[in-house]
Image: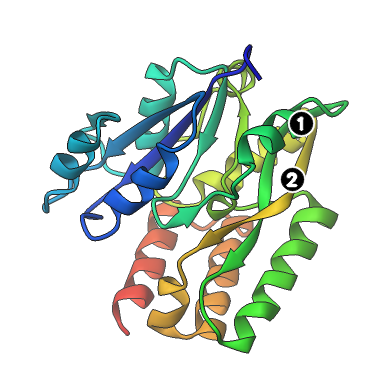
Amino acid sequence: MAQYIISIIIPVLNEAAIIKQTLWVLQKNSGVEIIVVDGGSKDNTVQIAQQTGVKVISVAEKGRSGQMNAGANIAQGNILLFLHIDTQLPPNFLNLVVKTLKQPEVIAGAFELAIEGDDRSLRWIEMLVKMRSRFLSLPYGDQAIFTTKQVFADMGGFSDLPIMEDFELVQRLKRQGKIAIAPAAVTTSGRRWQNLGVWKTTLINQLVILGYYLGISPTKLRNFYRGREHNK
């Protein structure tokens, strides 16, 4: 592991309530660089992150893609891992990331997904995510996508999209090599599913994907997604 440094890049926006705990857990791991990229928070997200001692930068352009690209640009690690602030990595993620990327023809990876909450329907979502990820090699951003810094640079990073930036990157990666799923799960907050309901949230996600395939403007898709998300 000595020759590998993993840079964990975390885009944030108004996450003062949870950022301290997430960073505290990550800082228990040696051999990682933690980069928080703020997209214009109105609360004290930035101040809390700075107090923990991790790298913190702010970007003018709004959108997760720009935030993650900015974090990648200053990363010192040779492996990049993109993490949502409400997602926890498995305890052995360091070894899993390196082992996954060492597999033949693998150029990127992600984890399986576990969702916080006791609702039985969440277990169905987890199963569907597992099938989609393993059989279609199609993980989403909440599964902590990782790749080498060189591959990320060669791919040109995330495209400048207001939504679906993770989906679009994975599609490009698949054309260049294999995407492997590490044999462990990240644990993500169930807040998105709790806000709207499990099946309604899933339906909205699928409609956005369908719209993307049909060529609907990413801006319109973002507005649709956020409109449904806020009309709870």
In the depicted structure, whether residue 25 falls above or below residue 120: above
Expressed as whole percent of the image width and height from the top left, the position of residue 230 reads 29, 75
Q: Is residue 217 visible?
A: no
| Contact (Cβ within 8 Å) of mark 2 with mark 1 | yes
Within 10 angstroms of label 1, few (less than 14), some, or many (20 or more) residues? few
Image quadrant assignment for residue 189: bottom left
Left or right: where does residue 179 sit relative to residue 192?
right
Expressed as whole percent of the image width and height from the top left, the position of residue 153 reads 56, 18
Within 10 angstroms of label 2, few (less than 14), some, or many (20 or more) residues? some
Expressed as whole percent of the image width and height from the top left, the position of residue 63 reads 33, 44
In the depicted structure, whether residue 3 falls above or below residue 187: above
In the depicted structure, whether residue 104 falls above or below residue 61: above
Spatial CA span between label 2 and label 1:
9 Å
Question: Between disc 2 and disc 1, whose residue precedes?
Answer: 1
Mark 1 element type: helix
How did the renderer colour the structure? rainbow
Which numbered dot is residue 99?
1
Task: Work out which quarter of the rendered image holds the N terminus and state it.
Answer: top right
Q: Circle 2 is placed at which residue position? A: 182
In the depicted structure, whether residue 179 falls above or below residue 84: above
Left or right: where does residue 73 sit relative to residue 152?
left
- Callout 1 amino acid: Lys
Left or right: where does residue 62 sit relative to residue 64?
left
Task: Residue lying at the far right in this picture: please name it.
Answer: 104
The residue shown at (75%, 55%) is 133
Mark 2 element type: strand
The residue shown at (39%, 48%) is 162
The residue shown at (61%, 15%) is 150
